[in-house]
Amino acid sequence: MMNAASPTVIEESKHKFEEILNAKRLLDVHVSVTVRPLTPEEAIGSPQRQDFPIIEGKERVIEADVLGAKGHAFTDSPRNFSGTMRDVLELPLTTNQNRGVFIAVLNAMLRHLEEIEGTVHCKNEDPEKCAKEIAGFVWEKRSGVKVGLIGLNPAIAEALISTFGEENVTVSDLNRDNVGKKKYGVTIVDGRDETDTLIERSDFVVITGTTLVNGTFDAIMQAIGKLGKDYLVYGVTGSGVCHLQGLNRMCPYGRDR
């Protein structure tokens, strides 16, 4: 368990972000920040497959607009927000809603400052191509190993299972509609109490950036570090935090607008 006094990864990122804003003299400048939930079509376009969580209504993408730069974050608790950068930094990062807003704004501002790229979700058939590239990357890095996927992204799950085999892939999810069901030959395990087991049995762990929003990321990374597992965070949500914290991330088709 984490020490109660230890800052979380997102809190550490917030501190680093505040230092950047101070150095750029953006904290005391009135910067208008707007955040809004996107429709599934706005966020992901019209992919051929229709089983992505955002299309099924289990998650939404929120979009922050900061000085014309856009940043996305996946969340199960979307909200509208309008305010200054100081308002964003004053949000307590204790709820999915506030963490989602902070991460979307962080991604947008770091994109505006040209510190990161690809902070907008890919569309149409790009998620399928992304899944194949992620599976290929893991195979090239650690071929023939056991892989864990934290967060059921159907395209990535299917690509990993196709590449590594059903017996070598474990998939967890928090959506109770998925837990216990077989997808692409693999039974989905409950991310609430079986994540440690998934990490133990895996040589390489692929993690959705949404874990930063739902508050499970730190426990996951703590277990990965303790067991010495290799890992990769995927998706636009984690772009800013992974950049600030030096974490492994892959998002080959993230867009800038």
Image (cartoon, rainbow, N blue to C red):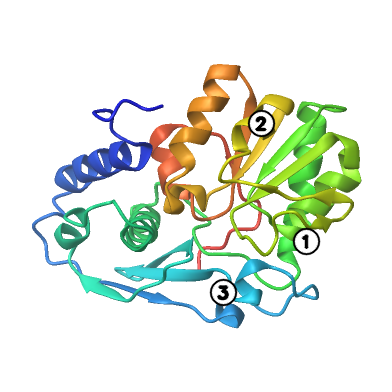
Residue 151 seen in this snapshot: yes
**Residue, disc 1:** 128
> Upstream in the sequence, badge 2 or badge 3?
3
Picture residue at 22% right of the left edge, 59% below the top: 88
Answer left or right for 131 relative to 30.
Answer: right
**Residue, disc 2:** 197
> Upstream in the sequence, badge 3 or badge 1?
3
Q: Which marked residue is nearer to the observer: mark 1 or mark 2?
A: 2
Picture residue at 64% right of the left edge, 23% below the top: 229
The quadrant holding residue 71 is: bottom left
Where disc 3 sits, the SS reads: helix
Residue 58 screen position, x and y as percent:
58, 70
Residue 119 screen position, x and y as percent:
49, 58
Residue 227 screen position, x and y as percent:
60, 18
Answer left or right for 23 relative to 160.
Answer: left
Answer left or right for 155 relative to 10.
Answer: right
Say which mark, if any, is on residue 229: none
* Residue at mark 2 to residue at mark 3: CA–CA distance: 33 Å
Are dots 1 and 2 in contact, CB under 8 Å? Answer: no
**Residue, disc 3:** 43
Three-letter amino acid code of the residue under disc 1: Glu
Answer left or right for 159 relative to 103.
Answer: right
> Upstream in the sequence, badge 1 or badge 2?
1
Where disc 1 sits, the SS reads: helix
| Above or below 229: residue 250 | below
Are dots 2 and 3 in contact, CB under 8 Å? Answer: no
Which part of the image, by quadrant, shows the N terminus? top left
Front position in the image: 63 or 60: 60
Three-letter amino acid code of the residue under disc 2: Thr
